[in-house]
Amino acid sequence: GLNEIGKNITLVECENDIIIVDCGMAFPDGDMLGVDLVIPDFTYIEQNADRVKGIILTHGHEDHIGGLPFLLSKVNVPIYGTPLTLGLVGNKLREHSLFNKTQLNVTNAGQTIELGCMKIDFIHVNHSIPDAVAFAIHTPGGTIVHTGDFKIDCTPITGDMIDLSSFARVGDEGVLALLSESTNAERPGYTPTERTVSDSLDSLFKSAENYRIIIATFASNVNRVQQIIDCAEKYGRKVAFSGRSMVNYMDVAQKLGYLHLPENILIDLDMLDKYMPQQVVLVTTGSQGEPMSALSRMAYS
């Protein structure tokens, strides 16, 4: 997964113990005809299953958790992750009838766990999905820092900014290796705060006051969806979700308290025809033009 898009998985092996960092999937390229998903090669893990002490998850994006059902059907090991991440994993495991067979351990940022001869610090980072963490993995051979996906946002929509002080502390103690991943990190400058999106949304809602609004976004970007809902409430619009992944993500996020819905603002997709165009906002998947996404199917229907 490092240095490529998708199927993130990293093994840290020390003495007789192995821990797994993330277990994702990737979508097939255009020349992979008949292929639905691309998953990592689990051969080494299967051959050394008795040495694997656990799986630790950085966050709940598909390229970091999407391969879990395929691995857990072969190797049963405990999983450690933050509440939203494990909420999304739980949904996935239920679909594959693996939920009751798997040990899910909720671990919050700031906590430390021990797996075999290794201690793992969970460090809060900002990302486009809430509850993302980095890891400081303390081994007898030295400390490995795995950042997961991250951005430095000093004014995030929810929660605290990235825990730079913990990174500084680990750095002062000494780091054997840094495994770092952040899209476009090699470009100079900085990423604007997510709060700038609120101003753009407000302006767009104003300019489209007489029209139906359709917004495509990643289903996992709970904070972005929250901003859309807040704008919809401000301008007196109802909100409908379209796309299976969007509905699933929002259901988990709402149940765990990461998404706050004003009373009666959410309507079912089938109810759209009962409202005037200027009374609704449709939030859908397909922001990257995926051919089978809800937005693409709308365009061709």
Image (cartoon, rainbow, N blue to C red):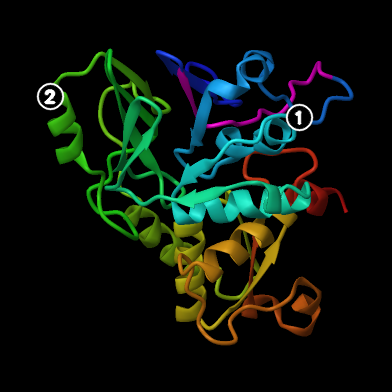
Residue identifier under label 1: 37
Q: Secondary structure at mark 2?
A: helix
In the rendered image, residue 18, in percent from the top left (x then y), is placed at 48, 21
Badge 1, how many Cα within 10 Å: few under 14, some, many 20+? Answer: some
Front-lying residue, 268 or 233 = 268
Q: What residue is shown at x 50% (from left), y 57% (from top)?
A: 222
Residue at image x 69%, y 52%? 99
Name the residue that disc number 2 marks.
173
Instruction: Name the spot of residue 156 as percent of width and height, x first.
Output: 30, 54
Disc on the earlier residue, 2 or 1:
1
- Which of the numbered marks, if any, corresponds to residue 105? none
Structural crowding at the residue carrying mark 2, measured as other residues with C-alpha within 10 Å and reported as few (<14), some (14–19) or many (≥20): few
Rendered image quadrant of residue 49: top right
Q: Nearer the viewer, residue 246 or 258?
A: 258
Can see residue 221? Answer: no
- Coordinates of residue 198 in the picture (x, y in percent): 38, 61
Above-or-below relation of 20 to 80: above
User: What secondary structure is the magenta-colored segment mainly?
Assistant: loop
Please provide the residue range marked out in magenta: 17-32
Residue type marked 2: Glu
Query: Which one is nearer the viewer's eye here, 78 or 215?
Result: 78
Say if residue 158 shows up in the picture: yes
Percent across and percent down for residue 301 are 88, 54
